[in-house]
Image (cartoon, rainbow, N blue to C red):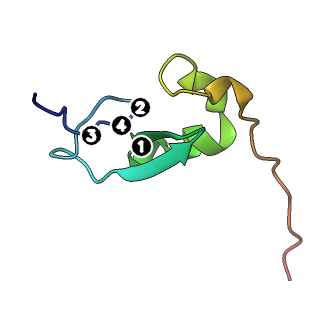
């Protein structure tokens, strides 16, 4: 049985095309490329149907930090 090469959950590019970061969530393993990491952080709803458990993720809150 042949194992499929890891691919980005957002764009589908493989580990042969881009670097991939491994995600572990709800005992499942997925991968995401650095370009789409902001999607995971700020717009996880865009990963619905692409990543198991995405429906349980909330976007990160943006905190403005005063400039010194």
Q: Which mark is residue 8?
A: 4
SS class, disc 2: loop
x and y percent of residue 54 in the render?
62, 28
**Residue topped by disc 2:** 9
Residue 34 appears in the rendering: no
Q: Mark 3: which secondary structure? A: loop
Q: Secondary structure at mark 1?
A: strand
Between discs 3 and 1, the one toward the N terminus = 3
Marks 1/4: CA–CA distance: 4 Å
Q: Are marks 1 and 4 in contact (CB under 8 Å)?
A: yes
> Which residue is denoted by mark 3 in the rendering?
6
**Left or right of residue 6: residue 17:** left
* Residue in view at x 22 percent, y 46 percent: 15
Question: In the rendered image, is residue 43 in sight?
Answer: yes
The CA distance from mark 3 to mark 4 is: 7 Å
- Neighbourhood count class around disc 2 (C-alpha, 10 Å): few under 14, some 14–19, many 20 upward: many
Q: Mark 1: few, some, or many residues within 10 Å (few <14, many ≥20)?
A: many
Q: Are marks 2 and 4 in contact (CB under 8 Å)?
A: yes
Q: Earlier in the sequence, mark 1 or mark 4?
A: 4
- Tell me the number on the disc at residue 32: 1
Q: Quadrant of residue 3?
A: top left
């Amino acid at each position: 049985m042949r194992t499929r090469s890891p691919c980005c959950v957002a764009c589908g590019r493989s580990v042969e095309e881009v670097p991939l970061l491994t995600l572990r969530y709800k005992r499942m393993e997925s991968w995401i490329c650095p370009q789409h990491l902001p999607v995971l952080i700020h717009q996880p709803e865009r990963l619905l149907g692409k990543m198991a458990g995405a429906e349980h993720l909330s976007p990160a809150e943006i905190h403005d930090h005063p400039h010194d």
